[in-house]
Amino acid sequence: MTGGIKPKHQRLVLLFVALVALVGAGLLAAWALRNQADYFYLPSEIVAESPEPGRGMRLGGMVEMGSIETQEDGVTIHFVVGDGEASVPVSFTGIAPALFVEGSGVIAEGTMDADGTFVASNLLAKHDENYVPRELEHMTADQVRAQVEATLE
């Protein structure tokens, strides 16, 4: 009689090794991505329970009217993001998107500072749902419909 492992036991060992490798790969991927997940907060959530400073997150809300202040260096902007219940001061250094204006929606990616200011590393400006191309701005609804139909012919 030979001292080798039976084929049935070889399959079980192979299955066990594959399962351990799969679990290990999943744990490794989760560990590698642990700091890549940014949580989304509204200003009222930040005011109610402030996240720890330095934690990556996203802040979403409306840019409050009269709050945008461009600093002397020309690239640093201070503004306030609110959601109707609370507001959070934000500081951003960089080139702001063209749609970034007072009263518009914004999503800021960054971290909270120890003094309660959100330090944004990236700004995403949102436009309203009523977007109309420049070419169609001054047309009536019938003219727009006719223009669309003409392009489909």
Image (cartoon, rainbow, N blue to C red):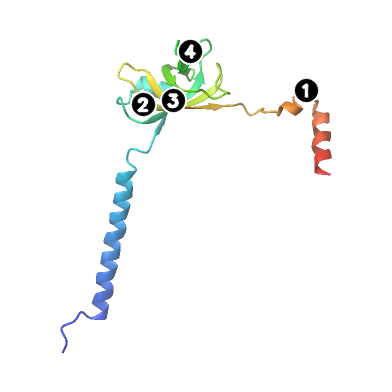
Q: CA distance from mark 2 to mark 3?
A: 14 Å
Badge 4: how crowded within 10 Å, few (<14), some, or many (20+)? some
Name the disc covering residue 111, or none.
Answer: 2
The amino acid type found where label 1 is placed reads His
Task: Check disc 1 and report its element: helix, strand or loop.
Answer: loop
Q: CA distance from mark 2 to mark 4?
A: 20 Å
Q: Closer to the camera: disc 3 or disc 4?
A: 4
Badge 2: how crowded within 10 Å, few (<14), some, or many (20+)? many
Please determine whether, in this image, residue 13 is positioned above or below residue 106.
Answer: below
Instruction: Please name the residue shown 38% across and 21% down the image.
Output: 118
Instruction: Please name the residue shown 84% across and 39% down the image.
Output: 150
Instruction: Please name the residue shown 84% across and 34% down the image.
Output: 146
Q: Is residue 140 left or right of residue 101?
A: right
The amino acid type found where label 4 is placed reads Thr
The amino acid type found where label 2 is placed reads Thr
Q: CA distance from mark 1 to mark 2?
A: 42 Å
Q: Which residue is mark 1?
A: 138
Name the disc covering residue 70, or none.
Answer: 4
Q: Closer to the camera: disc 1 or disc 4?
A: 4
Would you identify the image quadrant in which residue 11 lies?
bottom left
- Front in this rendered view, residue 1 or 84: 1
Name the disc covering residue 6, or none.
Answer: none
Q: Is residue 136 left or right of residue 21?
A: right
In the rendering, at what x and y percent does residue 132 appear? 70, 28
Asked if marks 1 and 2 touch (Cβ < 8 Å), the reply is: no
Q: Which residue is mark 3?
A: 42
- Marked residue nearer the N-terminal end (3 or 4): 3
Instruction: Please name the residue shown 32% across and 46% down the image.
Output: 30
Asked if marks 3 and 1 touch (Cβ < 8 Å), the reply is: no
Task: Check disc 4 and report its element: helix, strand or loop.
Answer: strand
The amino acid type found where label 3 is placed reads Leu
Please determine whether, in this image, residue 115 is positioned above or below residue 36.
Answer: above
